[in-house]
Image: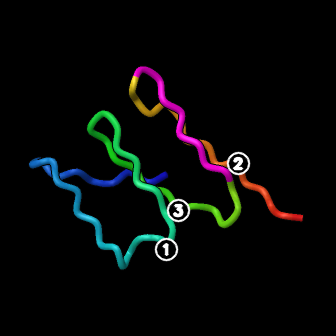
Amino acid sequence: MEPVEISETGELKLDIMELPINCVLIISEGKAKIAALPSHAETSIVTYKGKVKRVNFDEGEDF
């Protein structure tokens, strides 16, 4: 996951032309991160006390 810059005024500025075709943006505790989604995976976001604790990508492939 890559950090995304948040301006001093609290704004996120993203150029959608530079983002992966399929991605996830997660914002928690004043921080933002972005990650490309794998082509075949189960993605889970684990929270603890209302805060993002972990993001898991369980990749697999159909047989």
Q: Residue 58's mark?
A: 2
Q: Is residue 5 magenta?
A: no
Query: Residue 21, image x and y in percent?
Result: 49, 74
Q: Callout 1, which amino acid?
A: Ile
Q: Residue 54's mark?
A: none
Identify which residue is drawn at 44% across, 54% down. Answer: 2
52 w.r.t. 18: above or below: above
Query: Residue 26, image x and y in percent?
Result: 40, 47
Q: Residue 21's mark?
A: 1
For mark 3, what is the residue?
Answer: 36
Q: Which residues are magenta?
A: 42-49
Rounded to the nearest whole Å, what is the CA distance between mark 1 and mark 2? 19 Å
Neighbour tally class for label 1: few under 14, some 14-19, many 20 plus, Cα within 10 Å = few
Identify which residue is drawn at 26% across, 38% down. Answer: 30
- Nearer to me, 7 or 58: 58
Neighbour tally class for label 3: few under 14, some 14-19, many 20 plus, Cα within 10 Å = some
* Quadrant assignment, res 46: top right
Rounded to the nearest whole Å, what is the CA distance between mark 3 and mark 2? 13 Å
Identify which residue is drawn at 47% across, 23% down. Answer: 48
